[in-house]
Amino acid sequence: MASFARVTLELMSLGASPQLLTAYQSAAADEIRHAEVAFEIARGYGAEPSAPGRLPLPSMRPAEPERLALDTFMEGCVAETIAAVEAGEAARRAEDSELQVRLQVIAEDEANHAVLAWETLAFLLEIAGPEAGAAIRHRAWVKAPDPDAVADALSDDERVRAAHGLLPESLMTFLASRTWHQLILPMLDELLEDVARA
């Protein structure tokens, strides 16, 4: 939520459209709701009643288009796309129908946040220029995980945990790898080609 707030201010200083800024405000509200849902789920499993603690204010920084484009790619395009895939997989495996619905809503919200990140990246690349696009493509290939990652067979304990919305690390690693190579890298190439043609 804090990162959405900071990015909103940075985008305002770069002349982003009202539609883009409004979408960031909506996404920040989604994240607050996700936290509330997570606490409700935890209480449903017997956790002591609790709530979020204080969050330190993020430091303000100059709105540099190239740096913001790189951050948007990693924190938005990559992280939100993978989060949407993981939440969708958790929903698919959940046995409780109420938990399944909650996780699916989160998956859809994260997918919308990923779309927003890609739209933001397109806006920023128009400002930052081709050098920023080249830097992002380089970072993408450096950070991309092993394309040959495979999903291990789940143990009995892992299957039980997955049925309650907790995916094992090996499965999340596989999902991240597949998402990078089947979605993120092709989408980045397509975006950079579109920006170059514009």
Image (tube, rainbow, N blue to C red):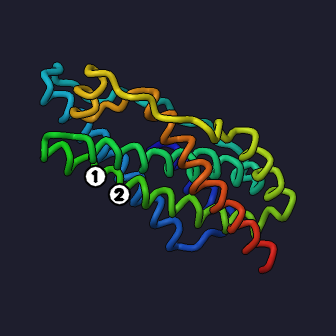
Look at label 1 and name its amino acid: Gln
Label 2: which secondary element: helix
Q: Quadrant of residue 1?
A: top left
Asked if marks 2 and 1 touch (Cβ < 8 Å), the reply is yes
Residue at the extreme right of the image, as rendered? 131
Nearer-the-camera pick, 104 or 182: 182
Label 1: which secondary element: helix
**Mark 2 = which residue?**
108
In this picture, residue 151 sits left or right of residue 109: right
Q: CA distance from mark 2 to mark 1?
A: 6 Å
Q: Which mark is residue 164?
A: none
Q: Residues within 10 Å of mark 1 (few under 14, many from 20)?
A: many
Against 9, is 42 above or below?
A: above
Residue beneath the point at 22% across and 40% down: 94
Residue at the extreme bottom of the image, as rendered? 198
Q: Quadrant of residue 46?
A: top left
Q: Which mark is residue 104?
A: 1
Residue beneath the point at 52% across and 35% down: 150
Quarter of the image that includes the C terminus: bottom right
Q: Quadrant of residue 169?
A: top left
Nearer-the-camera pick, 166 or 59: 166
In this picture, residue 52 sits left or right of residue 83: left
The percent coordinates of residue 40 (x first, y second) are 18, 35
The percent coordinates of residue 10 (x first, y second) are 63, 55
Q: How many marks?
A: 2
Residue beneath the point at 12% across and 30% down: 44
The percent coordinates of residue 9 (x first, y second) are 58, 55
Residue beneath the point at 15% across and 28% down: 43
The percent coordinates of residue 193 (x first, y second) are 76, 71
Q: Residues within 10 Å of mark 2 (few under 14, many from 20)?
A: some
Look at label 2 and name its amino acid: Glu
